[in-house]
Image (tube, rainbow, N blue to C red):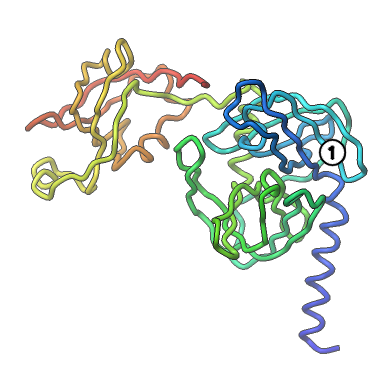
Amino acid sequence: MSADNALLDAYSLAVTRVAEEASPSVVAIHATPRAGARRSRGGTGSGFVFTPDGLILTNSHVVHDAGSISVETLAGDRFEADRVGEDPHTDTALIRVGARLPALTLGGSRSLKVGQLAIAIGNPLGFDCTVTAGVVSALGRTLRSGSGRLIDDVVQTDAALNPGNSGGPLMDSAGRVIGMNTAIIAGAQGLCFAIAIDTVRQVAIELLRHGRVRRAQLGVAAQTVPISQRARRHFELEARTAIRISEIEPDGPAARAGLESGDVIVGFAGDSVAGIDDLHRLLGEERIGRTLPLEVVRGSRRLTVDLVPRELPSG
């Protein structure tokens, strides 16, 4: 047997083994929109069993605005599902069915290597339990979620994904979940993305605890703006951009700290910020209710004020 054939056989064995073992844990999800929802037609997607007692992970955009959710297994069993919680900012949702189902093993995304085998299972365009395979094409990508926030540490793969794959698992050669498939670039080929499983796992824990992911907010409307070279030199700023406050919520954290419209945020809690995405990354649950320094430029002065972030409403 030639070396090329031996490699092909090893590849085939890995994919077929994962497909056989994992497919019973991958489900098709059918979501019927609630009355008055923005989408008028039902949606379909994929999901995978997270725990044997019926917890299933999927994308938030698959079940968002759903009035009813049903789940269908490879064996043809159909169950009604309840939403445990969702986080549109990471496009992650957790639903539950009243049945015991075989669960997939979650791997880790920190040890992933570019070029390693990646296997996707899902229900693209209604074709149940479709298996595709490729490699991990890149790591550490960012992807803009439907809410406008960036999802960090996204896994790029060339395992073919299509509408309906959303929420399905991306797995390694051992059948461990390394990501949750979430997006493709329309018109492109081989550019597909999955939310890293480390992110999905942490979000799932928060959804089980609170039904949502708790985040902090400052109570401002703001935008990323360029900073002139002269201003960077004068205020000793390294970043070429910062955050200009355009509106302040009455009686919000920023208002209580004495911030004003037009102030330019250049630092928060000891870290420099170059834009809205930087600030979002710093506004985690651990910041809620803590007094923290916020650095701003106001006119010709650079000021530091104490600010106490509050929890961002889940809506």
What residue is shown at x 74% (from left), y 25% (from top)?
68
Q: Nearer the viewer, residue 34 or 313?
A: 34
Whole-percent x, y for residue 52 in the image: 84, 34
Left or right: 250 with respect to 127? left
What residue is shown at x 83% (from left), y 76% (from top)?
9
Q: Amino acid at mark 1?
A: Glu
User: In the displayed structure, would residue 113 be above or below residue 70?
Assistant: below
Q: Write down the quadrant of residue 304 in the picture.
A: top left
User: In the displayed structure, would residue 266 be above or below residue 190?
Assistant: above
What residue is shown at x 87% (from left), y 46% (from top)?
24
Whole-percent x, y for residue 133 in the image: 72, 63
Whole-percent x, y for residue 12 in the image: 82, 70
Q: Write down the quadrant of residue 255 in the picture.
A: top left
- Secondary structure category for the residue under label 1: strand
Residue at numbered disc 1: 72
User: In the displayed structure, would residue 34 be above or below residue 132?
Assistant: above
Whole-percent x, y for residue 88 in the image: 55, 33
Q: Nearer the viewer, residue 252 or 44?
A: 44
Left or right: 178 with respect to 137? right
Residue ranking furthest to the top = 251
What residue is shown at x 76% (from left), y 36% (from top)?
30
Left or right: 102 with respect to 293? right
